[in-house]
Image: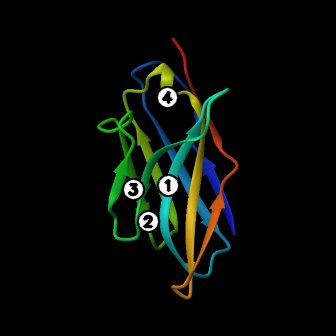
Amino acid sequence: VQVVESGGGSVEPGGSLKLSCAVFGSSFSINSMSWYRQAPGQQREFVARIDSGDSTYYSDSVKGRFTISRDNAEKRSDLQMNDLKPEDAAIYYCHVVEMVLAIHAYHYWGQGTQVTVYS
């Protein structure tokens, strides 16, 4: 299974970016799809998650500005990021939980995509 992020880039404060996460090589259902981020010198932190039933969860720091969505048929998740702030700058990682036979949960991470917010 391969998880691939795309859509990172550089933007001014107040700008918007849309990140995408695609899952390749999975033959089973995808349970949750999440986004995490890691800034230099910081620990990786949770940003947003969407479950198989489309329930969504956000960190307080991005609530109201970021929106996570998914396409179950395409095994893809998008993260729409609006009103970006300098503190949002980080490498963003997609995390996927694959359910095999509804019993075993396998976790996969992408390689990350860079988001830079400059003024």
Q: CA distance from mark 4 to mark 1?
A: 16 Å
Give how far across and how far down residue 51 sits, in percent.
40, 65
What residue lies at 34% left-to-right and 70% top-to-bottom? 53
Marks 4 and 3, how far apart in space? 19 Å
Q: Which residue is mark 3?
A: 69
Choose the circle earlier in sequence order: 2 or 4: 2
For label 1, the crowd category at 10 Å Cα-Cα, with few meaning under 14, some 14 to 19 and many 20 or more, is many
Distance in Å between CA atoms under marks 2 and 4 = 25 Å
Q: Nearer the viewer, mark 2 or mark 4?
A: 4
Residue position for label 4: 88
The residue identified by callout 1 is: 34
Q: Earlier in the sequence, mark 4 or mark 1?
A: 1
Residue that carries the numbered disc 2 in the rendered image = 71
Horizontal side of 48 relative to 36 (left or right) equals left
Inter-mark Cα distance, 3 to 2: 7 Å
Q: Nearer the viewer, mark 1 or mark 2?
A: 1
Q: Residues within 10 Å of mark 2 (few under 14, many from 20)?
A: few
Question: Dot 3 surroundings within 10 Å: few (below 14), some, or many (20 or more)?
Answer: many
Q: Nearer the viewer, residue 42 or 65?
A: 42
The quarter holding residue 21 reads bottom right
